[in-house]
Structure formats: structure tokens, C-alpha cells
Amino acid sequence: MRILVNAGPWLPVPPSGYGGIETVIATLVPELRRAGVHVTLATVGPSTIEADAYLRPLDAPQFASIALPYNQVSGIAHAHMQGIVQAVYDGGTWDLVHDHLEVVGPAVFAAVGPAAPPVLQTLHWDLAKHSAFYSSFNGRGRIRFAAVSQSQLDRAPQALQRQCIGIVPLAAPPAQDVHVDKAEHALVLARINRDKGQDTAVRICRRAGLPLVLAGPVAGINDPVELDRRLAAGDGQLASHPDARYFQEEVRPLLDGERYRWIGGVEGEAKERVLRSARVLLAPNRWAEPGATGVVEALSRGIPVVGTPLGVLPSLVDHGRTGFLAAGEQELARFVTKVDSIRAQDCIEAAAAWTPEAMAASYLRLYDQLIQEAT
């Protein structure tokens, strides 16, 4: 089987620090190749994941531009897709495209028509987000969809639900084999964004008397020194970025640089160490997160999770057994003080089904189904 995996133009695969979609792709591709699938990866220049072939329509990751006004950013995804379309017309022979680029991916492939292979798009986002598109889109049997959780699919327009052929829970990369001593800190492992609730995390940890580490980029910037340098230099584009404004106005005033600190984006062994040494992972989301790979990573390493009962979290976190869920800050702070009652083994066992092998096997079944339906 020959598959084109479209990761999009935003971040490399694997990502440097934050990158939920790209982390999923980096987890999936090796398993597909182990199963004998020939994988072509459509990505950006710095990607290092091993694949059988690559398409790199754009050299540099474009994530720093993703929150710019529409008239400044709308051409980026289309430029990436133009490179893929050209490869199709140049004779690329793929049995199926596994697409991960919201809206633009299926729209462009639908416009190409029968010249394009069948397409399976994984839906990584809140499906209330693009209702105008997904409530009217018709893939005509050649473009179908996979959700990442039932709670996500429940929020989808009816037209999209009818074109969804499966639910495939996200898996996280396996833990690295490093020795880590347990520390006292709580951890938020996510890009700095108001929907992720880092300001809430600081307040509940202050209330609970627990130190906190925030790990994740601000407006695509992983290095705190670089962020300060660019802001001090008057980088207006950065200063106006919604995530940078949120950090500067709502999060940074709550930090002290010691007990409550932002360390920037982390990857590899550094990420493994800060996660596995954490006392608890916090997910005080303000949005219905559909997949939550960070939660899966934490549970698979025996780290309990405390978060809000939105999106996929109630299906990942067993309240009282692998963590706690609550809507209000006072209750979240109370539960943070109770995480020592959670057994690490219960967390590990709860995450045992969300393996890379299981995710790849589920997608292989959907690939076969779609290829058969489209022929």
C-alpha cells in the first residue's frame, strides 16, 4: 500500500516542542512503515521523521504565522497544497491520502476530483470551529473522515457525521528510557494559549501551594530569551499575536520565575524529564479539546491528570482513579492537593490501550475500507 500523509505546512515532524498533530503523525508513520506501508510525507523542510519519500512544498515551518489576520495567512496552506497537487499531476501514484490539514486539505482534493487518490482526513480540531465548511462539504465517497473521540464527533455537523467512517483515539510516543527523580511541580504541557488555561493553572497552584512549570511555545517561540529579545526590539507582529498578548497580559504577571515559571518549549529528553518528574499534569482547558495527546502521554507514564470536564477529557481521565475533573478554580485547587491518592499503576493501565500499534492498526482498517469503497 502506498500512502501520502499530508502533515501540512505549520510544524516539522516530529515537532520541536509543541505540536499535537505533528506528534501524532510522528507516532503513526513508523508503525505504518513497520506494517509494510510505503509512506510519502508531505511536510516542511526541517522534518526528520523517517519516511520512504517526501514532499516539501515549503522549506520553513509556518506556525509563527498561523494566528495572523486572514489576509496575511490564507495563502500559506494553499501554497503547501499546490505542491501536493503538482505531485499528483506529475504522476504520483498513491493508493490513498491521509490528510491532517483542516479545511484546506479536503477542499483542494475535492477540487482536483478523480485525478486525486481517495482521501481520509483525521479531524484534530473542535468540529464546531468550521461549521460553515463541514456542514456543507460533500466528499462524494472519495473524501471521508476519521474522528479522534466520540465527544468530538458529537459536536460535528450532521453532514460531517455521515461522512465519518471511524473513530481512532490518539496515541502518544512511548516513554524514553531515562531515570527521573520525582519532583513536586505541577505541569502544563501545551502551547501558551487562552484556551489551554495557563492563567487558571497558575492561580490554582498558588491556591494549593504547589509549584508550577509551564512548558510550551508562545506564538511559535520556544525560547524565553528570544521572546523577550524580540518584544524588547519592538517586534510589532509578535506583540500583536493573540498568544503573545495572552501571555504578556494574563499569564506573565502571575509568574515569579521560581515556583511559578515558564520554561519555553521542550522536546526529546528534556520533555521526558519535565513530564515524568511532575507530580500532576494540569489541563484546565476552556475549550472542548478533541484528542489531548499530552494527557495520554502523562497517563502512560503514571502521571495523574487534573483538568476541566470538557471535550475528550472525561473519556480519558477516570475521576478519582487516574485524576480529577472539575469546572471551577476552587475545586480544581482542592483536587490538586489530592493527587497523591492516585496510583501510578492505575494511570499506566488506563492508557494501555492507546498504543501506537493500535492506532496504526485502526487506520489500516480504514484505509482498506475507503480504498475499496472508492474503486
Image: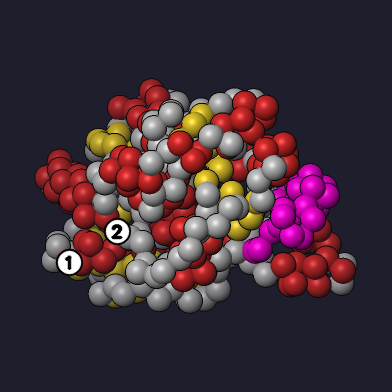
- Say which mark, if any, is on residue 28: 2
Is residue 365 positioned above or below 267 on the image? above
Residue 265 magenta:
no
Q: Magenta stretch containing residue 258, yes or no? A: yes
Relative side of 201 to 316, left or right: right
Badge 2 crowding class, 10 Å Cα cut-off, few under 14, some 14 to 19, many 20 or more, is: many
Three-letter amino acid code of the residue under disc 1:
Arg
- Of residues 42 and 189, the one drawn nearer to the viewer in this rendering: 189
Of 199 and 338, nearer the camera is 338
Quarter of the image where one finds residue 92:
bottom left
Residue found at x 58% / y 37% = 336
Whole-percent x, y for residue 64 in the image: 64, 62
SS of the residue at dot 1?
A: helix
Q: Could you say where residue 367 lies in the image, as x and y percent from the top left?
A: 19, 49
Going 18% across and 50% down the picture, which residue do you hit?
361
Q: Which residue is mark 1?
A: 34
Q: Position of residue 238 (x, y in %)?
A: 77, 61
Tag 2 and tag 1, C-beta contact below 8 Å: no
